[in-house]
Amino acid sequence: MKKLLFICSQNKLRSPTVEAVFSEYEGFETDSAGLDRHAEVPLSTEAIRWADMIFVMEKPHKSKLSKNFQPFLKDKKIICLDIPDDYEYMEPALIELLKQKVLPILRIKK
């Protein structure tokens, strides 16, 4: 089981969407969190330790993650998806974009 952690700012729209979408794929466990202090589910060191792969939505998320959690990121693969905060939760366009970006990384055919 590969453990995937998806991170955005508030954990309200993008990361919960991608968590839900990829929880349906066999062989993967998913979780999501937000980097902001008032996120629905704030990122924890436990979540980082748990994850095999960490996906962030934007470059500033990667910077903030590195700045605030550097000691826990050793040997962690961090992938920036470059998905702006322009979508609603479970919006079909967001789901399609997430699949376009994440499926190749996970070596899953559509």
Image (spheres, helix red, strand yellow):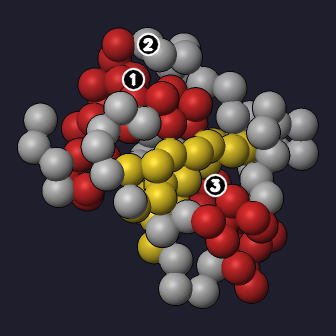
Q: Residues within 10 Å of mark 1 (few under 14, many from 20)?
A: many
Q: Position of residue 64 (x, y in %)?
A: 72, 62
Say which residue label 3 marks.
61
CA gap, disc 3 and disc 2: 21 Å
Q: Are marks 3 and 1 in contact (CB under 8 Å)?
A: no
Contact, CB < 8 Å: mark 3 with mark 2? no
Q: Hey, which quadrant is residue 14 in on the image? A: top right
- Residue 46: x percent and y percent? 75, 64
Question: Which residue is identified by label 2?
Answer: 91
Amino acid type at image mark 2? Glu
Report the residue at 35% width, 13% height from top.
Answer: 92
Q: Which residue is mark 1?
A: 94
Secondary structure type for disc 1:
helix
Residue nearer the viewer, 52 or 15: 52
* Viewer-nearest of discs 3 and 2: 2
Q: Are marks 2 and 1 in contact (CB under 8 Å)?
A: yes
Report the residue at 35% width, 24% height from top. Answer: 95
Decide if residue 101 is on the left or right side of residue 28. Answer: left
Badge 3 amino acid: His
Give me the C-alpha separation between circle 2 and circle 1.
5 Å
Mark 3 or mark 1: whose residue is earlier in sequence: 3
Q: In this image, 19 relative to 61: left or right?
A: left
Q: Which mark is residue 6?
A: none
